[in-house]
């Protein structure tokens, strides 16, 4: 009898930890995770690490397939979700352009076309420069930029994203002028910087990768609430007297027509993923702050967070 009870208890515990333990809706075929940017960038690394974490911990009964769908600063990928209707098997990552594009009139969708599935992390943005310029500090860059308006080419991955936000905020705060050039992905941005085709750029630690240690790119500052644990000597913009700072929000969205049971399943899936050692290690290595929110909390957060981008778009409009 004792052996039977022990065996039964084991079965119950295993079942409670398995994907089948989710109540309500459960997927029965593979899920498409749209990445609205090209391979190699921050969104791509974020999405593929999330999928690998879920697979490694057997959290989903079906496969999640990352699909890169770049173009128009993310608009093409997000529009595929906005027009998907009640399709529970199609979700997408978010980044800064998700918040800015509807404000500029460059997107055929609005935020109301989306269900906010889960928020996962806040991602810092580093200001890095090409080593051939000889800049060793933020002050070196500022001195040159003030003496040479428009000479420094500043690269980013979107004309209305976090990278452009850093560029324009630095211009306004420091009284300098850059020439901003957008790229299709963080990977393409990095290649241009490594080759000296641009002079400086904004990118996450995950994009810069080993090039930081090798000295192929020189970090000057980070836009974050505090210094990065693995780069404790790298000052924040606030440390350097720039009074505006901002971290990129990364999460998952679906079409607004998707049922609440579906949103609940995804929220539980991503909550479990966010608590795994693999995800915690990834976030720590990249200087990200894990800030999980379910589909109800993420909706509220979006309404507050988007105000930052309203101010940013007004700043850009004032330049024109």
Image (cartoon, helix red, strand yellow):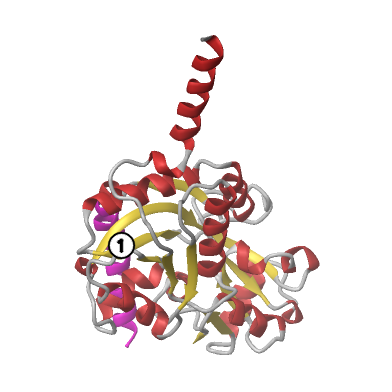
Q: Nearer the viewer, residue 93 or 217?
A: 93
Q: Nearer the viewer, residue 142 or 237?
A: 237
Residue 149 percent location from the top left of the image: 53, 87
Residue 17 percent location from the top left of the image: 48, 35
Is-magenta flag for residue 302? yes
Residue positioned 52% across, 84% down in the render = 183
Q: Is residue 240 visible?
A: no
Residue 309 image-quadrant placement: bottom left
Query: Outermost residue toward the right?
Result: 214
Residue positioned 24% across, 57% down in the render = 303
Residue 132 image-quadrant placement: bottom right
Q: Is residue 163 left or right of residue 138?
A: left
Residue 311 percent location from the top left of the image: 29, 68
Circle 1 SS class: loop
Residue 243 percent location from the top left of the image: 44, 59
Q: Is residue 12 left or right of residue 253?
A: right
Residue positioned 44% across, 69% down in the render = 173
Q: Is residue 229 visible?
A: yes
**Number of numbered discs:** 1
Q: Is residue 107 left or right of residue 266?
A: left
116, above or below 193, in the image? above
Q: Main secondary structure of the magenta part?
A: helix
Q: Nearer the viewer, residue 310 or 13?
A: 13
Query: Outermost residue toward the top?
Result: 1
Q: Which residues are magenta?
A: 299-320
17, above or below 117, in the image? above
Residue at image mark 1: 88
3, above or below 295, in the image? above
Residue 23 image-quadrant placement: top left
Task: Answer few, some or many: residues within 10 Å of disc 1's Cα (few below 14, many 20 plus, some between 14 and 19).
Answer: many
Q: Is residue 105 left or right of residue 291?
A: left
Looking at the rendered image, the quarter that the C terminus falls into is bottom left
């Amino acid at each position: 009898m004792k052996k039977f009870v022990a065996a039964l208890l084991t079965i119950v515990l295993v079942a409670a930890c398995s994907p089948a333990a989710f109540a309500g809706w459960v997927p029965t075929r593979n899920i498409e995770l749209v990445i609205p940017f090209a391979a190699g960038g921050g969104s791509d690394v974020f999405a593929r690490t999330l999928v690998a974490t879920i697979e490694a911990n057997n959290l989903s009964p079906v496969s999640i397939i990352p699909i890169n769908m770049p173009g128009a600063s993310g608009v093409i990928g997000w529009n595929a979700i906005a027009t998907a209707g009640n399709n529970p098997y199609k979700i997408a990552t978010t980044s800064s352009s998700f918040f800015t594009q509807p404000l500029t009139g460059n997107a055929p969708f609005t935020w109301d076309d989306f269900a906010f599935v889960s928020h996962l992390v806040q991602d810092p943005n580093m200001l890095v420069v090409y080593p051939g310029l000889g800049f060793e500090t933020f002050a070196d860059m500022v001195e040159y930029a003030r003496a040479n308006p428009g000479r420094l080419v500043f690269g980013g991955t979107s004309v209305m994203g976090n990278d452009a936000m850093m560029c324009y905020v630095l211009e306004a705060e420091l009284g300098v002028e850059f020439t901003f050039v957008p790229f299709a992905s963080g990977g393409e941005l990095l290649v241009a910087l490594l080759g000296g085709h641009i002079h400086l750029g904004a990118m996450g630690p995950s994009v810069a990768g080993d090039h930081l240690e090798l000295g192929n790119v020189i970090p000057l500052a980070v836009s974050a609430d505090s210094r990065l644990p693995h780069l404790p000597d790298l000052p924040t913009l606030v440390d350097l007297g720039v009074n505006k700072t901002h971290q990129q929000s990364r999460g998952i969205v679906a079409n607004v027509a998707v049922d609440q049971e579906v949103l609940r399943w995804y929220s539980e899936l991503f909550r479990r993923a966010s608590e795994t050692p693999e995800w915690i290690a990834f976030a720590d290595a990249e200087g990200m702050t894990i800030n999980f929110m379910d589909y109800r909390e993420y909706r509220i957060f979006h309404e507050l967070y988007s105000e930052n981008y309203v101010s940013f778009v007004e700043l850009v409009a004032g330049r024109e």
